Image (spheres, helix red, strand yellow):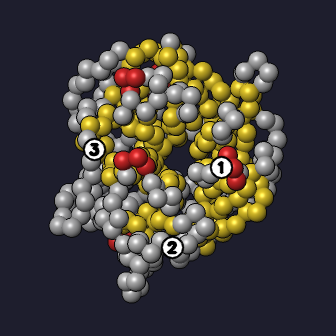
Amino acid sequence: MLGSAGAGAQAAGAAVDTPHVAYRIDTVADRLDHPWSLAALPDGRLLVTERPGRLRVIERDAAGAFRLRAAPVGGVPTVLAKGQSGLFDVMLDPDFAANGVLYLSYAHGTPSANHLRVARARFDGERLHDVRAIFTSQPAKSHTQHFGGRMALLADGTLVVGMGDGNLERTDAQRLSTHLGKIVRIGRDGGVPADNPFVGRAGARPEIYSLGHRNPQGMASLPARGVLYAHEHGSKGGDELNRIEPGANHGWPVTTGGVDYTGARITPYRTYPGITPPLAEWTPSIAPAGMAHYDGAMFPAWRGSLFVAALKEKSVRRVPMADGVPGPQETLFTELGERLRDVRAGPDGALYLLTDADEGRVLRVVPR
């Protein structure tokens, strides 16, 4: 599929004049059941999660063409796959080339008592070994929605994971006694970093890094700059792009730009003392799902941009960033007409897209 990037619809309705970028979209793999996340291995293979609980390998054949390995990776932990729950993110350890360690996030438990879990495992190319849970959200919740599930690594090597509010009691996102509606930070062995912002506070979960989140499903860490971005689903409007700082309160449900799906008002406040406002907001909702920071060589005009996959809008939003401030956005890849679950910047400089469908695809965007 051929395309070109030009002016696109903006969150605030502003026009944008961007450099002409011609691209081609190739199918890397298809017939994947709701692919959720992708990780590029050092040898050029790709790992892809399928929400029902499978981890798949995409290889290159002798001619260099991509090929989906028929058999899923063995040893994947049992996953609760119901509603929005399932196998979510896959992320490589910084020392993967030497130790083969990776991390998976997934729903664990039963429909009436479930958790977001992060497991650490060693991948030998065929199956997982030494699988060990290093984080399990608390307390258990009785709803299979709003898990979050996206992971990232910070500059100091610690791991952060986003946790949704569970879609039961919104105010859990403001309570330090629960992991619901938080971004948590742990060591890669599951330990709690001593400098986490709520360590030592009575009644607080020590893993909490930031709070006031509805359902964060996209993260982009820029370790060289010490910056972490996350976005999250609003309800009916009020999707947000946030810069995450330790101890920050991002407002949900005290502040939001959205309303309830019934049309009822959630809160009278768009801003409130002590609440960190979003960098950008999308109303109507675009349903942001995955996110990547692009700094590759294939598309020089896109360097320094955040790319946000959107389920409802069936697009990817390019958000140029200058000194941490988002510029006018560009709406890309709408010609696909598909819900887009994730976007990744590959080490080869290409962009990779994951479509959200029973027969989902992995797509590769390269210059034309």
Q: Position of residue 215 (x, y in %)?
A: 43, 57
The Cα atoms of the two marked residues, 1 and 3, are separated by: 30 Å
In which image quadrant can residue 103 be found? bottom right
Residue 35 appears in the rendering: no
Q: Residue, x 81% and y 36% (percent of image)?
A: 70
Task: Assess whether mark 2 and mark 1 are in contact (beta carbons under 8 angstroms).
Answer: no
Q: What amino acid is at disc 3?
A: Gly
Q: Residue 96 got which mark? A: 1
Q: Which residue is drawn at 45% across and 75% down?
A: 194
Circle 1: residue type: Phe
Q: In this view, does 154 lie to the left or right of 327?
A: right
Nearer-the-camera pick, 70 or 349: 349
C-alpha separation, residue under disc 2 versus residue under disc 3: 28 Å
Which of discs 1 and 2 lies nearer the camera? The answer is 1
Instruction: Name the one closer to the observer, 48 or 207.
Output: 207
Dot 3 falls on a residue whose secondary structure is: loop
Local crowd size for mark 1, using a 10 Å CA cut-off: few (<14), some (14–19), many (≥20): some
Q: Is residue 219 left or right of residue 142?
A: left
> Residue at 78% across / 35% down in the picture?
69
Q: Is residue 39 above or below residue 80?
A: above
Q: Earlier in the sequence, mark 1 or mark 3?
A: 1
Q: Where is residue 28 in the image (x, y as percent from the top left)?
A: 65, 27
| Cβ atoms under marks 1 and 3 closer than 8 Å | no
Residue on which the image places disc 3: 324
Q: Can residue 250 be seen in this view?
A: yes
Residue at the disc numbered 2: 192
Write down the quadrant of residue 283 in the picture: top left
- Of mark 2 and mark 3, the one earlier in the sequence is 2
Label 2 close to label 3 by CB (< 8 Å): no
Q: Residues within 10 Å of mark 2 (few under 14, many from 20)?
A: some
Which SS class for mark 1? helix
